[in-house]
Amino acid sequence: MPVHGTLSRRLRKDISCQINEEKIYSGATFFLGEEFVRITENDKGPAINTDFDWDSIASVRTIATIPE
């Protein structure tokens, strides 16, 4: 579900993202707002929303599968 006033981006199948060296998100949708980042996961179950304040994000790590 879109979040009003945000820019949304879905992770590609071969890309994962880790924020603050915590949970690794795969197949999630990121909603980027002026005051917060919302990550929405829906893996054949209930939708899970995780919100981050921009000031609480210290690091972002992307993990990609490199084709041989």
Image (cartoon, rainbow, N blue to C red):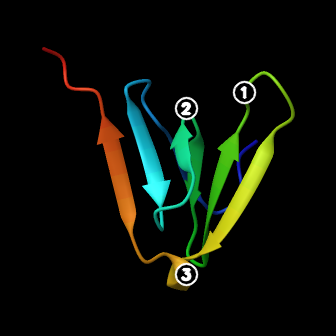
Which secondary structure, mark 1? loop
At label 3, the amino acid type is Ser
Which secondary structure, mark 2? loop
Residue 44 against residue 34 in the figure, above or below: above
The reply to whether callout 2 and callout 1 are in contact (CB within 8 Å) is yes
On residue 43, which mark appears? 1
The reply to whether callout 1 and callout 3 are in contact (CB within 8 Å) is no
2 and 60: which one is in front?
60
Residue 51 against residue 35 in the figure, above or below: above
In the rendered structure, the answer to whether residue 36 lies left or right of residue 64 reads right
Mark 2, residue position = 27
Q: Residue at x 44, y 24 (%)?
A: 13
Image quarter in which the N terminus is found: top right
**Marks 1 and 3, how far apart at CA:** 26 Å
Q: Residue at x 38, y 34 (%)?
A: 15
Q: Position of residue 3 (x, y in %)?
A: 71, 55
Residue 68 against residue 17 in the figure, above or below: above
| The residue positioned farthest toward the left in the image shown | 68
